[in-house]
Amino acid sequence: MQCKKCEGKLEVKRSCGRVRMRCARCGREYQIHEVADQLDAETEAILERYTCLIYD
């Protein structure tokens, strides 16, 4: 997955009861629902490990 801002790689970031996507290049964070249409198989496999995702 790529960042909408700089096209860097988005990585799953988990912290204190929430899961976000964070760009490895620019550091911008996205809520899951903001990038849900771009999820690839690799990212979906990672997110499947969490029992629930909090949308805040």
Image (spheres, rainbow, N blue to C red):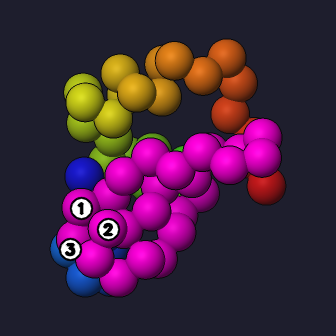
Residue at screen point 51% across, 18% down:
49
On the rendered image, what quadrant is the C terminus found in?
bottom right
Towards the viewer: 30 or 18: 18
The quarter of the displayed image where residue 36 is located: top left
Query: Label 3, on which residue?
Result: 7
Q: Check if residue 28 falls in the magenta segment.
A: yes
Q: Check if residue 32 falls in the magenta segment.
A: no
Task: Please tell me whether mark 1 sits on a helix, a strand or a loop.
Answer: loop
Task: Please tell me whether mark 2 sits on a helix, a strand or a loop.
Answer: loop
- Tell me which amino acid carries mark 2: Ala
> In this picture, is 19 found above or below 47?
below
Residue 21 as seen in the image, left or right of residue 45: right
Dot 2, how many residues are within 10 Å of its Cα: few (below 14), some (14-19), or many (20+)?
some
Residue 32 as seen in the image, left or right of residue 28: right
Report x, y in % for residue 4.
Answer: 32, 73
Label disc, if present, on residue 24 of the rendered structure: 2
Q: Which residues are magenta?
A: 8-31
Report x, y in % for residue 7.
Answer: 20, 74
Circle count: 3
- Tell me which amino acid carries mark 3: Glu
Report x, y in % for residue 40.
Answer: 25, 36
Residue 21 as seen in the image, left or right of residue 44: right
